[in-house]
Amino acid sequence: MNIWQLAGLCGVAFAAGFIDSIAGGGGLIQLPGIMACLPNVPVVTLLAVNKTSSMFGTMTSMFEYTRKGLVNAKRMWKSALIAFFTSALGAFTAKRVPNELLKPLIIVLLAFLILFTLLKKDFGETEHKSRFTTAQQSLLGLLLGLVIGFYDGFFGPGTGNFLIMGLIFIYGENFLHASADAKTVNGMTNLSAFLMYTLMGVGNLMLGITLGLFNMAGAHLGVKLAVLKGSKFIRVLFIVMSCGLLIKQIIDLL
């Protein structure tokens, strides 16, 4: 790798951390960038580098949102814990079952997510009372952590987007609080995947940590902007990133 490739990757990691900390979808920027810069490196190594970098960014986002009092740790810790273990299970399963089968389903889910958010213009802009009881919220939160954790380990695209949508639906949060709480779960899934790849010895820690530092810087700036601009801004960016992810999934499928 030459210095220009490294500089480009660092810029991509910064942008990915920035976008992901606000609305999710950082992987849409970072992973294709890594693959484009390093076309001759084994894909599993690139996935490991991507997860290492993403782990630094999501952990930074989680810390920053928590420091600003926007994370409901009492509510989210169980979902985050179960997601940690199911992410490892998903990664283990992905070695044995082709995840290409998920692409058509993800396209349908993303299309529904975008249409629903566009048509329901007040969705996630303000906090509202949840339609579920406290016990139901707890159960659905655990189910969300279980499913999202496994999905992120097994396949991954759109994890942050699906998390934000799920948290708004279950708890009645706005986009700002949902984005903050999503980082607790996403941080654990990325940590789990990082540990799995490290144990398998397939990554490149030096490159992953280097990109992770830039991802952290982007995440730090992104959280500041998210708090400053609020839920309406996050909602717009959420729709833009979801559309970008949908287009990429369709292109990949074709």
Image (tube, rainbow, N blue to C red):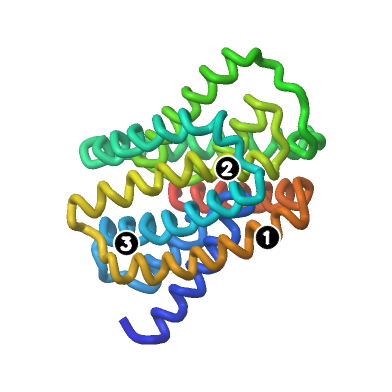
| Quadrant location, the N terminus | bottom left
Q: Residue under circle 1?
A: 224
Going by the numbered disc 1, the residue's amino acid type is: Lys
Q: Residues within 10 Å of mark 3 (few under 14, many from 20)?
A: many
Determine whether 65 is above or below 14 in the image. Answer: above
Going by the numbered disc 2, the residue's amino acid type is: Asn
Residue 46's mark? 3
Going by the numbered disc 3, the residue's amino acid type is: Leu
Q: Residues within 10 Å of mark 1 (few under 14, many from 20)?
A: some
Q: CA distance from mark 3 to mark 2?
A: 22 Å
Q: Secondary structure at mark 1?
A: helix
**Residue 222 at x, y percent in the picture:** 63, 60
Q: Secondary structure at mark 3?
A: helix
Residue plotted at (76% across, 57% down)? 228
Q: Residue under circle 2?
A: 161
Along the line of sight, the residue nearer the viewer: 35 or 6: 6
In the image: residue 42, left or right of residue 60: left
Residue plotted at (37% across, 55% down)? 51
